Image: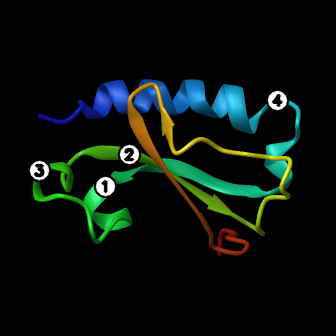
């Protein structure tokens, strides 16, 4: 059984504090950070993992080699991809 959306949302908030809002300045690269489903982010996920919640990070541009975002944070999978700049209409 997967983690609850409430737990994953709490972990996402902690993740943002640790990785996105402190030095080194990830905020220059990170455009979005939200919650998604593993099956949406990983088309090869095992059937029992597809409905699990995960953290989804969208980048404006690729991170430099000295900035690393973990693939898992406090038991929650983290998916990172470059999506370019997203702005409100």
Q: Which of marks 2 and 4 is nearer the N terminus?
A: 4
Quadrant of res 9: top left
Q: Position of residue 44 (x, y in %)?
A: 27, 69
Q: Can you tell which quarter of the image residue 18 is in?
A: top right
- Nearer the N terminus, badge 3 or badge 1? 1
Q: Residue at x 73, y 38 (%)?
A: 20
**In the image, which is nearer the foreground, mark 4 or mark 3?**
3
How much space separates mark 1 and mark 2, taking CA atoms? 6 Å
Question: Counting other residues with Cα less than 10 Å from the Cα at mark 2, is it few (<14), some (14-19), or many (20 or more)?
Answer: many
Q: Alpha-carbon neighbours of circle 3 within 10 Å: few (<14), some, or many (≥20)? A: few
58 or 75, nearer to the observer: 75
How is the protein colored in the picture?
rainbow
Residue 27 is tagged as: none
Task: Kindly identify which residue carries mark 2.
Answer: 54
Q: Earlier in the sequence, mark 4 or mark 3?
A: 4
Q: Which residue appears at 64% of the width and 34% of the height? A: 16
Residue wearing tag 4: 22
Rounded to the nearest angstrom, the CA distance separating label 1 from label 4 is 26 Å
The answer to whether the residues at label 2 and label 4 have Cβ atoms under 8 Å apart is no
Disc 4 vs disc 3: Cβ atoms closer than 8 Å? no
Q: In the picture shown, does residue 27 fall above or below 21? A: below
The mark nearer the N terminus, 2 or 3, is 3
């Amino acid at each position: 059984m997967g983690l609850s959306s409430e737990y994953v949302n709490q972990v996402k908030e902690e993740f943002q504090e640790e990785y996105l809002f402190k030095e080194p300045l990830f905020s220059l690269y990170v455009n979005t950070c939200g919650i998604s489903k593993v099956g949406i982010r990983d088309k090869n996920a095992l059937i029992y993992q597809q409905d699990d919640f995960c953290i989804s990070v969208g980048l404006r541009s690729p991170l430099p080699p000295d900035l690393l975002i973990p693939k898992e944070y406090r038991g929650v999978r983290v998916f990172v991809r470059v999506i370019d700049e997203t702005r409100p209409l």
